[in-house]
Image (cartoon, rainbow, N blue to C red):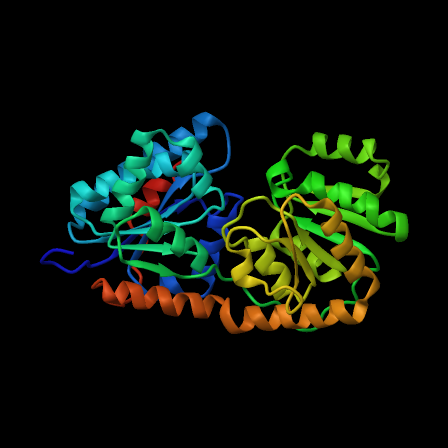
Amino acid sequence: MGRHAPTRVVMVGTSAHTRGGISAVVAAYRRAGLFARWPIDYVESHRDGSRLAKLACALRALAVMTWLALRHPHALLHVHVASRASFWRKCAFMALGRVAGWPLVFHLHGGRFADFYEHECSPRGRRVVRFFLDRAACVVTVSERWSTWVRAVSANPRVVCIPNAVRMPRREMPPREDALIAFVGRCEESKGILDLIEALAEVRAAIPRARLECAGEGDLEALADHADALGVAADVRALGWVGPGERDRLLARAAVFALPSYAEGLPMSLLEAMAAGCPVVAAACGGIPDLIVDGVNGLLVAPGDVDALACALHRLLVDRALADRLGREARATIARRYTAEAALERLEQLYAALGVHRGPAPAPSLARRFQEIS
């Protein structure tokens, strides 16, 4: 850290209005009081919109961070990073932080980062990834499996696991709708949505009332075409992007939540479904096996195994006693380990260990007002 302890935290991540896991994590931190208890300046480096809007957001963020570096020479840089464009965009901020002499907290999100590093990066690109991992004051991962992966590719011994966190909904929930399967996430092949439609077609052979509601953006035309080809178009409803309230109502109504992804970190949608007490079927990939114990608080299937997915869905739709037990234990798992309070306790310990002093949040700064200019 050098001779001077950081006087504040500069956190870089997506806009609060952006749809995705990182913004949901930061929103959970904010609701739980992190920004009220620590001197944090939040820099929005990315937002939804056109390429021009995204570029303008990134350039504004770099200007804001430059201004913060000039005003606060002793700060801690906390960067939320995912794969592909997210990583390359954050390289500029991490490089600027190194020039400023700020210690770095490299907070790794995104279930495809290993694939990005191992298969999409050139040898030079992999060196860039390792450069920032190796030199971080701490690397934060969202699951122990991701911590193991980081230790395998980086020489940095300072790796900690801070799982994503969610708000616990109220206990009083309406009765679940018979045979309703829910999916929340980006509607694309890597999330297993096409596999889920195929599994629905198999399930309907035994349970004709089974149906699927999908909440999320993506290739909705491909989803509709696949459902039509399988003869289940009338039983698949694509909701598009929904806000937190409608998402919570879907998770409270659903008989089963399914997330048959091919790659994940620790998906917020799965945590939210479990917090709602919804029985879950998920693919055993990324950090999901750290969260779900098969047959205890959910059911696990291999990514891409449509038959196993259909069997698991059928099992929970038929055996409601099992589904209720798994749903209760899923909610208890979140209450024990994945609340925002639990995550913040570990994050605050990390900030304190890196020399930041807890204190009131700064008043709305010139940096924040500058970012709000559209």
Would you place residue 115 above or below residue 157 in this image? above
Of 152 and 219, the residue lying toward us: 152
Residue drawn at point x = 69 percent, y = 34 percent: 220
Would you place residue 274 above or below residue 111 in this image? below
Where is residue 138, by image quadrant? bottom left
Which residue appears farthest toward the top when viewing the image? Answer: 52
Of 122 and 133, the residue lying toward us: 122
Q: Position of residue 272 (x, y in %)?
A: 60, 59
Q: Which image quarter holds the C terminus?
A: top left
Where is residue 96, by image quadrant? top left
Which residue appears farthest toward the left when viewing the image? Answer: 3
Tell whether 9 sits left or right of 34. Answer: left
Q: Position of residue 184 (x, y in %)?
A: 65, 49
Residue drawn at point x = 55 percent, y = 59 percent: 289
Would you place residue 30 above or below residue 225 in this image? below
Q: Position of residue 294 (x, y in %)?
A: 63, 64
Q: Is residue 208 visible?
A: no
Tell whether 187 sits left or right of 146. Answer: right
Of 188 and 47, the residue lying toward us: 188
Q: Which image quarter holds the N terminus?
A: bottom left
Of 300 and 75, the residue lying toward us: 300
